[in-house]
Amino acid sequence: MVPIPTLSCCGRGQGEGCWIRLGGSVATTPERIALGRIGRSHGVTGAFRVWPYADDFERFTRLRQVVLTRGNKTLAAVVRSVQILPDCVLIQTEEVTRPEDVATWLGGDLEIAAEERAKPPDGEFFHDQIIGLRVETTDGQLVGTITGIIEAPASDVYVCRDGDREFLIPAVDVFIQSIDPAGGRMVIAPIPGMVD
């Protein structure tokens, strides 16, 4: 049994601990993970707002190097300072020093190297580790593939597709028997009608 299949999310995005972000991606590249969306500048020194994709704002205080991305443009940057605000984070880098520089990255992603990603507690997984898993029942019947995650108030709900058929699987331990990202599979114990 899996106690809590996925980490919680603020609902704004997909980076560490998140999956769904309209107009974005889980891992921008296999080498980098998006932590937040770059917002407008703050002041005249090139500081800018970042809207985190996950609830752990404190994570930003440990950043030393980041990558700013927007479209095909990227900029490796050294973090000079971080200030946590109630709903976003202010970041100042060595490379972005004017409000005009911030405008170049507005709406883009603030990313880190994939190896710097925080490790989830045992038995918990990041959403991007769940997406793409093959779903089977406890008796070995192939159900489909996880193609999305809906963040609902009580628990996440996995969207599983098999061709044109779609199944919604609540991410609770009564249904989820095991999750094996390395093996690419999830085993479920469905109730009648769940995957018929």
Image: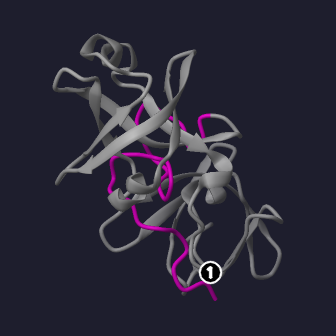
Q: Secondary structure at mark 1?
A: loop
Quadrant in the picture for the C terminus: bottom right
| Quadrant in the picture for the N terminus | bottom right
141 with respect to 99 (left or right): right
Q: Which residues are magenta?
A: 1-28
Please state if 51 lies on the left or on the right of 94 as rendered.
left
Q: In the image, residue 136 lies at what x, y percent?
A: 75, 69
Q: Residue at x 35, y 63 (%)?
A: 152
- Vertical placement of 97 versus 164: above or below? above
Magenta highlight: main SS: loop
- Above or below 72: residue 110: below
Q: Position of residue 45 (x, y in %)?
A: 24, 23
Please tell me whether residue 26 belongs to the stretch shown in magenta.
yes
Q: Residue at x 61, y 80 (%)?
A: 123
Q: Residue at x 40, y 46 (%)?
A: 13
| Callout 1 amino acid | Asp
Label 1 belongs to which residue? Answer: 122
- Tell me: 187 left or right of 17: right
Tell me residue 15's x, y (percent).
49, 48
Q: Which quarter of the picture shows residue 163?
A: top right
Query: Is 178 displayed left or right of 18 in the figure?
Result: right
Question: Does 116 appear above or below 120?
Answer: above
The residue nearer to you, when weighing 101 against 182, is 101
Q: Could one spot residue 160 in this view of the protein?
A: no
Label 1 crowd bin: few (<14), some (14–19), many (20+), radius 10 Å: few
Report the front residue among 177 and 24. 24
87 drawn magenta: no
